[in-house]
Amino acid sequence: MPILPPQQRTDPHPDRTGVRQAEAALVEHYPRLVRLAYVVLPPSLGRHRRVLAAHAVVQRALPAAGSRVRVPRVPAQSRRSGAPQGAEPAPEGAGPEQGPSSAAYGWMRLRVLRAALAHERRPRWWPGRLPAPAALRPAVPVVWGLRLFPRAGGVDELALDRALSTVDGAVRAAFALQLLEGLDASGARELLAGAAVADPGDAVRRAARLGRPDRAGARAMLWSGEFDPCTVQTRPSDLLRRRHRVRAVAAAAALCVVAGGLAFAVDAGTRPADDGRGPAGVAAPALDPARLLRTSPDRWADTSRVDFTAWPARGGRTDDNALLGRALRAWAEPPESVRVSTTPGTAAVPPAEPPQLLFADEVDGAAVVLFHDHADRVVRYAEPLSGSGGAALDFARTDDADVTTGAAVVVSRTADAARFLLAPWIAESTTRDLLAPDTPGRPLEVGPDGVTAAVPRPGAGGACDAWPVIQLRSSERIVEKHAFLLTDLGEPAPTHLTYMPKPGRGTPARQPREATGPDALLAWARTACSLRALAGSGVRSVNNWAFAEQKLPEGGASADWVCTRADTWRGPGRVLVQFLAPAASPAAPAAVVADREDTALCSKFGQHVLAGTHWRAGSGRWYVLGAGSRAVTGIRATGAVRGAAGGPTLAVRAPRDADVELTGSLSEGGTLTAVH
């Protein structure tokens, strides 16, 4: 739901040029200014109030239509400079351009900054428990009956928002001025001084520690939908509470009317309209437990679409309409007491038609309901059986799921373990530790309703001394001798692990296969801990591609090069290139030599890869190593050292920190640069 800026007004008085130019700058750069205000405002306001406050701050920054600005003009300033110190500058005399470098924009930006910072400033005599006076000021726009919030981001955006909530407004302002406005440290200090910040230098120094080490990534996150208060999602407010308030007002009005001798009964808006619509405009059939879709128990064996649509409804409370009704209503209209989480790229919108019921029962002290809807999502609702805790609602994408990616869903998760609901086509289940490739799997107990025993969570407690996975085997009614691995990365749908073996001499390129063989398990033992970097990012599957094997100098031992590609449900992928040097332990972590996001590298659309790293031999000498995939016919090193080699690998003597660029030649012509 885009929120548009107020329409530009024409000023009939030609002597008010400064105000008109300020208004033009506001209208042209309204989304930019509102985003700046949103980042600076206190996160304690909550996302709904912060969205409205950000728009109010920017709209109030414009002087009144009848005012005349009589303060010194501001010289045009570049994006890499700050606003001058001292009194508030005026836009008078600004040039016709109202871009981010214009004086009019700089003047408006300073006014917005001052107003946003005022939300945390309290006079000494002001009660500490009350919000700052600026936060109590009536503001427009006003929204009645709806809750507004920006689009939900991923784990990284959430972590950044939490980090911003731990610092004061001046630090948030310094951070936003540098990453959103492109100011350098000096320019940010000057602008903060103009906004009456007590210690601008300290604010800039503290802001420099935010977003490290990936400041470019932090900048991209600030420009993402998570921090965009102009493109928002809506939900109704608490309808029951609103109706109670309306009833109370109506009752008070009725008493006043009776006391005045007038007999009116005012109850407008308190009676639900019988229009076939449910909460938030959802079609009533979509919220009717009796209309839930239920698949027959044997459907999975008689269909060519083996995914969540073939799951039957299981569990002991599939006929509990009260529980199912609460789950559907929470999905359609989550009250504030319900914790809502979504995997990246998953819409948390209500169902358009009756969804499919997958499961309803009590698990680990909670009543759990699983739905699958026609938008290819799995929705999990869980409410505690006792205590005062609120319910939880989790959304996960499952579009184009198959025998493997549609084989399990997390039905219950604690800090240390998780239980899975398995697909009806799973004939055998075991657990194994990826860091112990030579240890056989152990049987995993599964109840009659398809719920597994608790499986330890990988990386619980922050350590990576074990990486439990579940190994499942499909029924022979679907495919013979088909076993595969799934791992829990903290989301409702577990992640499918695969492996692509080393290139063989004279053999064609190979395709990813299940990671259950000896070579696959050995490779995953070295790279499993790198999966921690992928947690919470909506990963559908991860493939280990052993794209090269290299004979190392000074001894003849061999090392492997592996490209670990994570594909998300929403499409984009992330690649980690890892170097597996000889090690005493089969679970010694590999060295990550390259990390790239949103890339087709190491997929069928990016079949060529070249990477390099520094390596120290047993003699203490340092080398630059390079390796490429099967189509690389030669590698050239330039920079601090020079060297060349025919074939897909290179080793050249070089200082430990030598800056070297690697370029590969491809068999079909052309060149390839090393991934970083």
Image: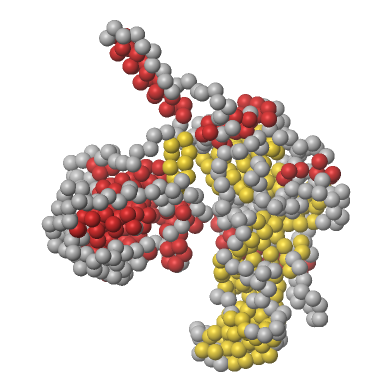
Residue 194 in percent (x, y) is at 21, 60
Residue 558 in percent (x, y) is at 71, 81
Residue 467 in percent (x, y) is at 66, 58
The one of 547 and 303 positioned closer to us in this rendering: 303
| Residue 262 in the image: above or below residue 566 | above
At 17% from the left edge and 56% from the top edge, which residue is drawn? 14
- Asked if residue 289 shows in the view, the reply is yes
At 75% from the left edge and 45% from the top edge, which residue is drawn? 423
Is 668 positioned to the left or the right of 491 in the image?
A: right
Q: Quadrant of residue 291?
A: top right
| Residue 100 in the image: above or below residue 127 | below
Colour setup of the view = secondary structure
- Asked if residue 117 shows in the view, the reply is no
The one of 428 and 70 positioned closer to us in this rendering: 70
The one of 482 and 478 positioned closer to us in this rendering: 478
Picture mark count? 0
From this viewpoint, which residue is outermost toward the front? Answer: 12
From this viewpoint, which residue is outermost toward the top? Answer: 261
Is 395 positioned to the left or the right of 159 in the image?
A: right
At 55% from the left edge and 75% from the top edge, which residue is drawn? 676
Q: Quadrant of residue 97?
A: bottom left
Residue 37 in percent (x, y) is at 33, 53
At 17% from the left edge and 53% from the top edge, which residue is drawn? 13
The one of 389 and 289 positioned closer to us in this rendering: 289
